[in-house]
Structures are given as C-alpha cells and as structure tokens.
C-alpha cells in the first residue's frame, strides 16, 4: 500500500465533516490507547482528527508507564485500553482518577473506577448493542455543538454505544431515546460532585463510543466529538509543582 493511498483511506475514515479551525498550538494531548486490539479500532482516525484540530498528540500504549499527565493539557482515554488491568491496580486508578488535568474517555467499563458513575454494571454503566440514535437534552451547552434538542443519529445503524448514569453534578448532554438514565454524552465541570461524593479535579467527559465508532460517525456525531474535546480542553489544569 502506497503512502498516498493509505493517507486517502485515513481521510475517508475521518469523515467529511471538516475539523473545527483552532489555533496551531491548540494544546498538548496525551492519547491513551492500545495498538492492534482484537477487532481493530478507530484510534488512528481519532489521532488524525485531533491533529487536524491543531493538537499536538502523544500516544501511549495502555495506562501503566504512561507519561506524567501534568505535562499535557488534555488526556484522552480510548476504550481500547485494558480496563481489567486498570481496575486491578489501585495506585494506577488513583493516578488517573485524581489528576488535575481534563479527561475525555469513551471506556464505559472505567466509569465506576473514575468515579464518574456508580459501581453496578448494567445499572450505573453499560453498553447498548445498537446505540446509533440519541436524544439531545441540553442544547445550550457547548458540548451540544449547536445541535437542536430532540432525536438524532450520531453513528451508522447497528453501532454499539456505551452509556453511564452520572452523579447529580453532571451536565447530561444526550441520552438513549426513552431511557433518560442512560447518558451517552455527559461531563463534569471542575469542582462538580461526581459519584462517591468525589469532586471533579478538572473537567471530565464521557462520550459513548466503542472501539470502532469514530469511523462510523455521522457528521453530527463528529461535531459532538469535536465539541466534547474542545470543552474539556478549555478547562483549567491544576497540577502540583514538584519541588
């Protein structure tokens, strides 16, 4: 495969919706992902999208041994990370849960560990086998990307979607139609109360994608993704100065 042909395929995967025009130095992003997961992933297309938005992206294989998040303006955590290894390592959980750097993730199996939802799978968080529709409930919020309230489609048909039931301090942007407790896009402002009475150390965002969702997104879905990234990145970073 020639480099030109590979680039063309990646451009098609990213989609037709142009990336929003941001400053060339939009910020530094740490992208936590897993190379070559079973079934593949859209992580390369996500990385290309972030770079097209003006971010300098550093990728890290998994969570253990990743760079200090305080060296970045935003941490993006893919669903391809090995969540079972994450949950077995309590110090690692605390590192990513308590960091004062904004976070965007689409790994629903880590929502309880990150204190973004309660602990019960299929009650507080889970996955929809077909989650391509959404019900947008907070149109004035920046993460709604100017999309009107109501029913819409953000991925192609028969695309799975993750969901979470966030704490009362969350801004719920969209849910699965007819099931308001299943939020597929929500965020916490810094200082907002998450689950376990934990206060968000910085902005936190969940968007209910799965490993390959990004390449199956509609233009509406890409707008929502972009808006989630921009909103999270705009939040303040609070890191202790090392002595």
Image: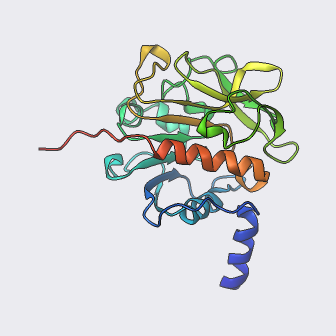
Quarter of the figure that contains the N terminus: bottom right
Residue at 44% in and 53% down: 30
- Residue 235: x percent and y percent? 43, 40
Left/right placement of residue 44 relative to residue 148 reads: left
Q: Quadrant of the C terminus?
A: top left
Query: Would you say residue 147 is visible in this rendering?
Result: yes
* Residue placed most toward the observer, 141 or 54: 141
Q: Is residue 210 above or below residue 203?
A: below
Figure check: 11 above or below 113: below
Residue farthest along the right direction in this orientation:
157
Scheme by which the image is coloured: rainbow
Q: For the view shown, which residue lies furthest in the left direction? A: 243
Answer left or right for 176 relative to 47: right
The quadrant holding residue 9 is bottom right
What residue is at 71 percent from the left and 70 percent from the top?
11
Q: Horizontal and vertical percent for residue 207?
A: 64, 38
Q: Position of residue 114 (x, y in %)?
A: 48, 29
Left or right: 207 as drawn, with respect to 177:
left
Asked whether residue 211 is in view, the answer is no
Which of the two residues, 157 or 16, is positioned nearer the viewer here? 16
- Depth check: 15 or 127 in front? 15
Residue 156 horizontal side relative to residue 193, left or right? right
Residue located at (79% from left, 51% from top) = 218
Residue sitting at x 43%, y 14%: 197
């Amino acid at each position: 495969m020639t480099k030109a042909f590979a680039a063309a395929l990646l451009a098609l995967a990213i989609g037709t919706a142009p990336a929003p025009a941001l400053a060339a130095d939009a910020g530094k992003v740490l992208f936590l992902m897993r190379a070559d997961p079973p079934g593949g992933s859209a992580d390369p297309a996500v990385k290309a999208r972030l770079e097209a938005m003006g971010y300098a992206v550093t990728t890290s294989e998994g969570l253990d041994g990743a760079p200090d998040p305080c060296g970045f303006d935003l941490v993006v955590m893919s669903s391809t990370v090995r969540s079972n290894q994450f949950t077995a390592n309590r110090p690692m959980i605390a590192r990513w849960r308590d960091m004062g750097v904004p976070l965007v993730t689409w790994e629903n199996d880590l929502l309880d560990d990150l204190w973004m939802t309660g602990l019960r799978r299929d009650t507080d968080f889970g996955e929809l086998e077909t989650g391509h529709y959404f019900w947008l409930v907070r149109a004035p919020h920046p993460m709604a990307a100017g999309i009107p309230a109501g029913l819409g489609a953000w991925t192609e048909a028969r695309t799975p979607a993750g969901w979470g039931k966030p704490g009362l301090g969350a801004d719920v942007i969209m849910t699965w139609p007819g099931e308001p407790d299943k939020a597929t896009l929500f965020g916490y402002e810094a200082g907002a109360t998450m689950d376990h009475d934990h206060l968000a150390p910085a902005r936190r965002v969940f968007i209910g994608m799965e490993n390959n969702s990004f390449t199956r997104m509609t233009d509406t879905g890409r707008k929502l993704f972009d808006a989630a990234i921009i909103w999270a990145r705009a939040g303040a970073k609070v890191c202790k100065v090392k002595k």
